[in-house]
Amino acid sequence: MSALGEVLDGMFARLRLRSLRIFWHVDFWGLALVIGIASGVAAVLFGMGIAWIQTWAYGTPDVNRLHSFAENLDWYWVVLIPTIG
């Protein structure tokens, strides 16, 4: 193979590698986007699950007013429910 052929092969190899690097970054951006969206959805569902469990455990329809509802509970329920959960 001639010297010119080797130089051209090297140039084309670098161009192919460079184009692969560009797509490699795009793949990671897409993966990061999917992971971020999944994490956000998981965080929202986790919060909704905690609210549902508190509603079920304390028997109150509004978890935001839980402090006023807990005033009427016996002391051992106030300690026992979070300890179990």
Image: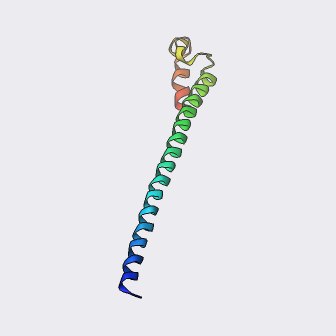
User: Which quadrant would the C terminus be assigned to in this image?
Assistant: top right
Question: For this rendering, which residue is in front, 31 or 52?
Answer: 31
**Can you say whether 29 is above or below 13 in the image?**
above
Residue 23, above or below 42: below
State the residue in front, 26 or 83: 26
Name the spot of residue 48 as percent of width and height, x first. 58, 28
Quarter of the image for residue 55 reads top right
Evaluate whether residue 41 shows in this view: yes
- Note whether 66 is above or below 7 in the view shown: above
Horizontally, is 13 left or right of 71 in the view? left
In the current view of this chain or complex, which residue is farthest to the bottom?
1
Whether residue 85 is visible to the viewer of this picture, yes or no, is no
Q: Position of residue 47 (x, y in %)?
A: 54, 30
Q: Residue at x 52, y 35 (%)?
A: 43
Q: As displayed, is residue 80 above or below residue 73?
A: below
What residue is at 60 percent from the left and 21 percent from the top? Answer: 58
The residue shown at (55%, 11%) is 72
